[in-house]
Image: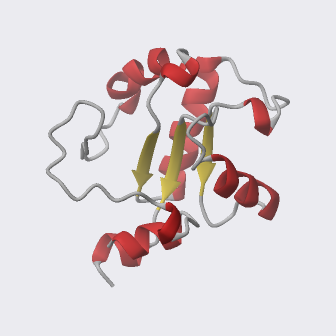
């Protein structure tokens, strides 16, 4: 599973730190929810977190469809006041899916692993083989 996730996110396994202990710490957690009909209510807290800038923990939201990725990204962008002309380097949220440009893919693969990265939220779709163990 680790290898599949790294491959999907274009991360080099040697650059990824694996925590191999029970993550009973407040800064490491996994939370899994099926998407509610109105995700906005469930993700409202995230808007305030992202506004904190680098004080916001890094968050990866995995989605099962590109439609969900775009819908969540669009909603967060609206809530944060991003217009379409905000430069990639100034955004704290980003999408990751099979249709992103090579430029954005390269930028994200370089920026996200940095401890001081301004990217705080990645909304990503994982290939169906990751979801279904294939």
Q: Residue at x 54, y 63 (%)?
A: 9
Q: Position of residue 11 (x, y in %)?
A: 55, 65
16 up-or-down from 45: above or below = below
Figure quadrant of the C terminus: bottom left
Q: Where is residue 108 in the image (x, y as percent from the top left)?
A: 67, 52
Q: Residue at x 55, y 69 (%)?
A: 12
Figure quadrant of the N terminus: bottom left
Count of marks overlaid on the render: 0
Front-most of residues 101 and 112: 112
Q: Position of residue 49 (x, y in %)?
A: 45, 19
For residue 107, side relative to residue 51 (left or right): right
Q: Where is residue 18 in the image (x, y as percent from the top left)?
A: 34, 59
121 up-or-down from 43: above or below = below
122 up-or-down from 52: above or below = below
Color theme of the render: secondary structure
Front-most of residues 58 and 14: 14
Front-most of residues 9 and 126: 9
For residue 43, side relative to residue 117 (left or right): left
Q: Which residue is drawn at 80% across and 32% down?
A: 84
Q: Which residue is drawn at 59% across and 60% down?
A: 97
């Amino acid at each position: 599973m680790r290898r599949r996730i790294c491959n999907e996110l274009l991360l080099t396994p040697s650059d990824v730190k694996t925590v191999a202990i029970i993550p009973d710490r407040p800064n490491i957690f996994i939370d899994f929810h099926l998407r509610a009909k109105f995700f906005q209510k469930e993700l409202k807290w995230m808007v305030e977190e992202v506004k904190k800038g680098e004080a916001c923990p890094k968050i990866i939201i995995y989605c099962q469809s590109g439609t969900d990725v775009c819908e969540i990204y669009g909603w967060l962008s609206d809530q944060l006041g991003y217009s379409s002309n905000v430069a990639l380097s100034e955004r704290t949220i980003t999408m990751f899916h099979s249709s992103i440009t090579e430029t954005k893919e390269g930028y994200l693969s370089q920026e996200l692993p940095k401890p001081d990265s301004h990217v705080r939220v990645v909304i990503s779709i994982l290939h169906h083989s990751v979801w279904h163990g294939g």
